[in-house]
Image (tube, coloured by chain):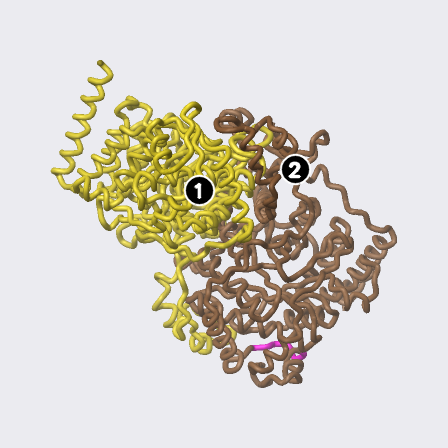
Chain colours: A yellow, B brown
Amino acid sequence: MARRGRNVVKGSGKLAQSPWGQPINRFGPITFAAAEEIEALHDASMELLENTGLYVLSEKALRLYEAAGAKVDYSNNRVRLGRDMVKACLASAPSQFTLHARNPDRNLEIGGKNLTFLTAATPPYCSDIDRGRRTGNFQDMSDLLRLCQSLNTVHAMTGYPVEPQDLPVPTRHLDCYAAFIELTDKVWRPYGTTPDAVKDGLEMICIARGISREQLKNEPSLLINVNINSPLTFDDTMSDSLIEMSEMGQAVIVSPFTLAGATSPVTMEGALAQQNAEVLSGIVLTQIVRPGAPVVYGAFSSNVDMKTGSPAFGTPEYNKCAIISGQLARRYGLPYRSSNINSSNVVDAQATYESQMSIWGAFLGGVNVFFHGHGWLESGLTTSFEKLVIDSEMLQMMTAAMKPLSFSAENLAVEVVDEVGPGGHFFGTAHTLARYRNAFHAPMVSDWNNFENWNESGGLDATQRANAVWKQLLQEYTPPPLEEDRREAIHAYVAKRKAEIETMKAA
Amino acid sequence: MARRGRNVVKGSGKLAQSPWGQPINRFGPITFAAAEEIEALHDASMELLENTGLYVLSEKALRLYEAAGAKVDYSNNRVRLGRDMVKACLASAPSQFTLHARNPDRNLEIGGKNLTFLTAATPPYCSDIDRGRRTGNFQDMSDLLRLCQSLNTVHAMTGYPVEPQDLPVPTRHLDCYAAFIELTDKVWRPYGTTPDAVKDGLEMICIARGISREQLKNEPSLLINVNINSPLTFDDTMSDSLIEMSEMGQAVIVSPFTLAGATSPVTMEGALAQQNAEVLSGIVLTQIVRPGAPVVYGAFSSNVDMKTGSPAFGTPEYNKCAIISGQLARRYGLPYRSSNINSSNVVDAQATYESQMSIWGAFLGGVNVFFHGHGWLESGLTTSFEKLVIDSEMLQMMTAAMKPLSFSAENLAVEVVDEVGPGGHFFGTAHTLARYRNAFHAPMVSDWNNFENWNESGGLDATQRANAVWKQLLQEYTPPPLEEDRREAIHAYVAKRKAEIETMKAA
């Protein structure tokens, strides 16, 4: 009954999706700010980097900045970057690079007009409409990873789909990385947020891909997100994880959380200027560490709800900043990260229209790396199983909408119209019959039955139908192939590291 | 409790909305089809008009086409239009015009980058989450008109917000037009769909505006939508209503319903070529009747659900056609109509994401006249009270997103960031305090409370909150002022015409 609306592969009963692949963005980029306004933003952020400077906690980072020509005041950890130095560092950052998955069919092209859709990054909670909202655990994380593997719109994982809080913190990342490797064959992120956790990620991806550390250096396989702590604070775990990744030639996304009215000025112009200064300070560090290291311009400027002071996402201001941030990324020739976010507490119209504002802002901004693409709810505190499916549906629709047309005589079909003639219909023509099976995008969740049929088959809304979709996907899930020796080596690495960490704790 | 999430004017408790006004489209137009592809579409449609031709039922229309140079075959009502004739007629169509409301503050500028948001046109049913789905009646229509008057995003009415099926058909339009005039002061559409009903509309708008028929000719005040019956059939009620309106200098939108795979070829390219031929055939007639008569290029190409043959709206194919149709309208220098539509049976995520696909397709297509902008549900069979509010919310958000920024030193706020410094926050700065009250768009429906607060205040989803919004709007509604003599004249006209129609029926 609930299956009625769903799109299944004929005969198999299996859920049919759009095929795997990275879409080409045909909607963006557009310009929202004029060229001289982008320069005004650039100048304001250069002023911030030159005069106000950055508070950098890590000794290692301070020395790297200094060696590259920054003014460093060790008495107060302040780093000031001249605009010539910033410009010189930006020159070596690549505009496009490849991320290598353990399954080469899952490799990703980052930059240009290529789109990469990711997952919600590590919310503390998860929810579905049967079991409600709950603290993240390893079982739920594993199920969400199975869904990430199954859904073709998920190109890579941005973090843990939910934080598995039932696992001990010091070794949690090891179990999660092993789950990434065993349950999926897609690109993932070493989310540990400490340099040591990043190191474990680098070791484990080498095992999973069966490559040396030298090869890894030339084949970026992992991405991390580095969050400048706005305003203008570069925490040591962040800078040192960045250093670890860039040394190894892995991808770093730098994304400050510039929340207008809280962590940045209340004006969106001010939030964008500060965002730009903060992003560039991180990108400069990647290029100091290793010129040519892959890096992404990350934007996350939004506004607070002035009634409560809490952040709001998918707002009109957020949409605008997503477009302008893309203009900034292109000014520096960098790939661009944006996010699919909303502030709703339930998978409803608000969750959807705020997400859509985020999606269109990103696409029109020329996004390359679309963070939080699947499942984000409650301003990022929850991954929703149903939202994950609905986000996949929306991204499938965006992908289908961008498919080019072909204005051949056959498709323009003048003769077909002539043959049918005024007052006829096209259901039975040879032209229709030859094409109708694949003529149009087929949805996973949308129900196009008329009211009566829809009502008779249970009157389910989209969220309830999405519930049936993820259950079917979990049932149909099969783990991607993994060479047995690599699996064993992964397990052995995890066991060894757990023992080391236990010993260190005991010591 | 339910009021928590809502945006009220401080002290008054009244619902706060974005102000009345037509937004300027800053997102579109974009191009999806290349210039030579647009020419291929144009050529294909010219071929259809020249060779296949149109089936025109009205004798009056046949004679008008013939007098203007078309090849007319009276034996089979076939009209063939040469491309030179089409070109000559298009030359006199204005690219922009003003629609005059009975309240001049509600006048609308149609064309250019100006956006006009309308309502769902005359569904047979209406629904809300308390009373469910029901056959349209005059009470519900009147309540919906009150909401149309109250919501600032509603610029004009596209028809009856719901068909009042409890009123007798022959005189229904008279009561509805009187309701338009008394309950609102905005532009409306004489929906009668017969030339006589259009005539009544023309008389009644003259009374409502207190102007002569001569003045009306120079001040377009009404709009109608003329539907070419695809494929290539021009029904007599449609052509003759068009003639009536264009003679009087009133606005005509020509919109065929080209449904790929049913009323047009299964390829979207073919649907667009046929759409273009059909739109132009109607536009040509307006200019034959009165060169310079205001007219709008209407597009309504979508695809069927190939499983059921029923129409699907807000699909990826629809989105693409909305963008390309805008390119076609601009090729001819005409204002462009698109629609806010979806195929959901309930106000859920599907209703919203399909609407958003329609909204963005229209905006990126450079829409001027946004039909069905508020309330459309169930592929147009129902106006939903809650969807009407949620559509208003989404259009408010679009409007806010398009507001330009100003990159002044004050807004770039470099000094403010410097003053706060690394690690500080911006809540208490003078810069924030001076601006926070109006810094950001404030929603009507969205709830940005955290999960706990949201849950405690009832855990309402967006549809439930929209329900509270329309109830509050109805409570706060006050009818717009109307001169007593005009009101009496309207009533007298309605009474006179009802008597005439009764007499005619009896005869």
Q: Residues within 10 Å of mark 1 (few under 14, many from 20)?
A: many
| Residue underneath mark 2 | B471
| Residue underneath mark 1 | A340
- In the image, residue A322 sits, relative to residue B110, either above or below, namely above
Q: Amino acid at mark 2?
A: Lys
- What x and y, as percent, mark residue B250? 72, 66
Q: Amino acid at mark 1?
A: Asn
Front-most of residues B186 and A339: A339
- In the image, residue B204 sits, relative to residue A472, either above or below, namely below
Q: Is residue B59 shown in magenta?
A: yes
- What x and y, as percent, mark residue A369? 38, 45
- In the image, residue A27 sits, relative to residue B13, either above or below, namely below
Q: How many marks?
A: 2
- Quadrant of res A498: top left
CA–CA distance in space, label 2 to label 1: 32 Å
- What x and y, as percent, mark residue A166? 31, 23
Please report, as a chain letter, where disc 2 is located: B
Quadrant of the snapshot with the N terminus of chain B: top right
